[in-house]
Amino acid sequence: MSQHNIVGSEAFTRGPSVIIRKYKAGGMRRRRSKTIATFIAGAGAMLVVGLITAAAVYGPTLAGG
């Protein structure tokens, strides 16, 4: 009888097994908040571009009377 605890595909992997010793619990929260911040920044930039475009298109009409 073998005394080894080999489960599933562990017997066929070529590399060494990796043991995670530290796990940061807030990693997913930070990633989600970074994604939300990027989305808000992109939406704000598109709003500014839209306002500048509208001012360029309609500005001369409004200023000329």
Image: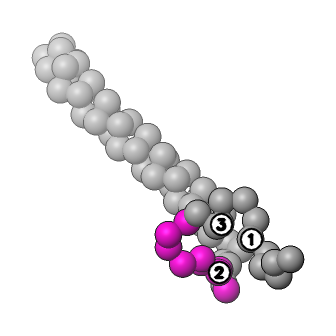
Residue to which mark 1 is pinned = 6
What residue sits 40% from the left and 44% below the top?
A: 42
- Is 61 in front, or is 11? 11
What residue sits 58% from the left and 63% below the top?
A: 12
What type is the residue that disc 1 sits on? Ile
Q: How is colour applied across the structure in the image?
A: one colour
What residue sits 22% from the left and 18% below the top?
A: 58
The CA span between labels 2 and 1 is 15 Å
Q: Give the magenta-colored segment's residue range.
A: 13-21
- When the figure is inspected, residue 40 is found, relative to residue 26, above or below; the finding is above
The CA span between labels 3 and 2 is 13 Å
Badge number at residue 29: none
From the top left corner, tell me how far across and down residue 19 is, in percent.
Answer: 65, 81
Indicate left or right for 24 with 55 as reference: right
- Do the CB atoms of the residues marked 3 and 1 lie less than 8 Å apart? yes
Q: Secondary structure at mark 1?
A: loop
Earlier sequence position, callout 3 versus callout 2: 3
Indicate left or right for 8 with 38 as reference: right
The CA span between labels 3 and 1 is 6 Å
In which image quadrant can residue 62 be found? top left
